[in-house]
Amino acid sequence: MEEHSAVVKNNDHYLKTWISNEVLNKTPIFGSYRNFCKSVGQDAMEYPDFEFWYYRFYHGQMDLDYDRSMDPVPKTIMDMPVSLMLKITENLGVVERTHLRSMNKSLKDIVDSQAAIFDEVEINVSDDCMSWKLNDRVFSCELDKQGCKLSTPNKSEIKSDKNFIKKGLEYLIPFFKIPKISVNHLSVSMFDPTSALDDLLPVPFHVRSVNFLATDKNTILPFLSAFIPEQLESIELKNLYTFNEEIMLKFFETKQFKQAKHAKLRGYFKKDDLWRFSHLESFECELDPNEQVDFQKIKEIISTFQQFEACKLTRHNHRDFLLLQTFALALGEQIPDESINIIKHRYQIPESNEYLEFEIEDKVFYCNIKIVKAR
């Protein structure tokens, strides 16, 4: 059988006669080429050559001995003017342009000449899965018995005997090496300690907003150090409850925090820590439940913040209704009965026409204290 197939592949007239019969049978060209490959082999004839003979016979030119040596060299996509290639790539989504980089060096150079701006990049790592999202395209690499299973946005699955993180990084590392890459919002969650992502991000990295969660307290400062302080506007850090004071003091001294405009910190802070937020336009944090809320002190501190627009403070109270009554008394407001779970207060900033508007809402196990500057 193999010997017969080799003879057929080397018989030029036989191959062309096969194509002409497909044309006579009115078989569409793509189906015809699939039939051709099944019958005589995948390597018998490249598709561009098959296409040439198919349409030549289709137009009634049945000369099997036609000499193509004098024909013009067929054009390829790389023969298009660079300006046209740039126009085409500009109309592709940024994720599609990322895939185009892997085609060949010329396409890679064209793609790399354009800024790659992603709205959202999200990376999640647990003890059995690594997933990542590039804008609206979701990828995942999951642990299985043989190694791992990679799932891509087009629903295809790729089996591998590699570690799931190692396999996932084969896709992520080239992504972060794209020249001129920038991200509007980057979210990284590491539910399982790993050093595999330590050198993943380029330095410096253009990011406007970051969201970071890690169980390893030693990862927070190296993570933030990759970002350009002048461009990083918003920082959200989760799971800070177990982070020691030394690390948080170092965080407050980073250029990234000092030049940010917005911060959301999921951890307990004392009222005197609020001074560290004086440069921010907005912030969220949780007040230490072991410290009594001093509204007079909070008003005194926040009223001095020149850039301040709004904040939300959360105080866990274990459903102690008396806490809301205490707030009302401290603010000079009417003490509510148990049917009321919201109190409001308006405080004029000294020597100013501006006000701080307080709204304290009693939830099931905590209170939300929202403060907005009004003019």
Image: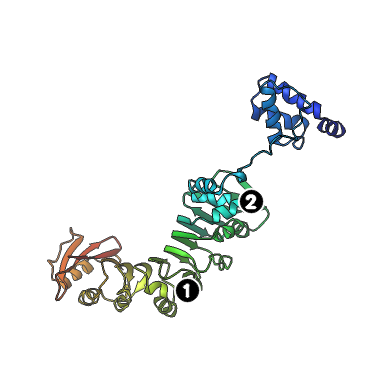
Quarter holding residue 342: bottom left
User: As shown in the figure, which amino acid type bears the numbered disc 1?
Assistant: Leu
Looking at the image, how many numbered discs can be counted on the residues? Answer: 2
Q: Residues within 10 Å of mark 1 (few under 14, many from 20)?
A: some
Residue 76, horizontal then vertical, whole percent: 63, 42
Residue 181, horizontal then vertical, whole percent: 50, 59
Q: For mark 2, what is the residue? A: 104
Q: Is residue 34 visible?
A: no
User: As shown in the figure, which amino acid type bears the numbered disc 2?
Assistant: Asn
Nearer-the-camera pick, 222 or 24: 24
Q: Residue at x 21, y 60 (%)?
A: 341
Residue 166, horizontal then vertical, whole percent: 62, 60
Q: For mark 1, what is the residue? A: 221
Above or below, 30 relative to 314 = above
Above or below, 270 relative to 116 = below
Of the two numbered discs 2 and 1 in the rendering, the one whose residue sits closer to the viewer: 2
Q: Quadrant of the C terminus?
A: bottom left
Choose the circle earlier in sequence order: 2 or 1.
2
Q: Is residue 277 visible?
A: yes
Q: CA distance from mark 2 to mark 1?
A: 38 Å
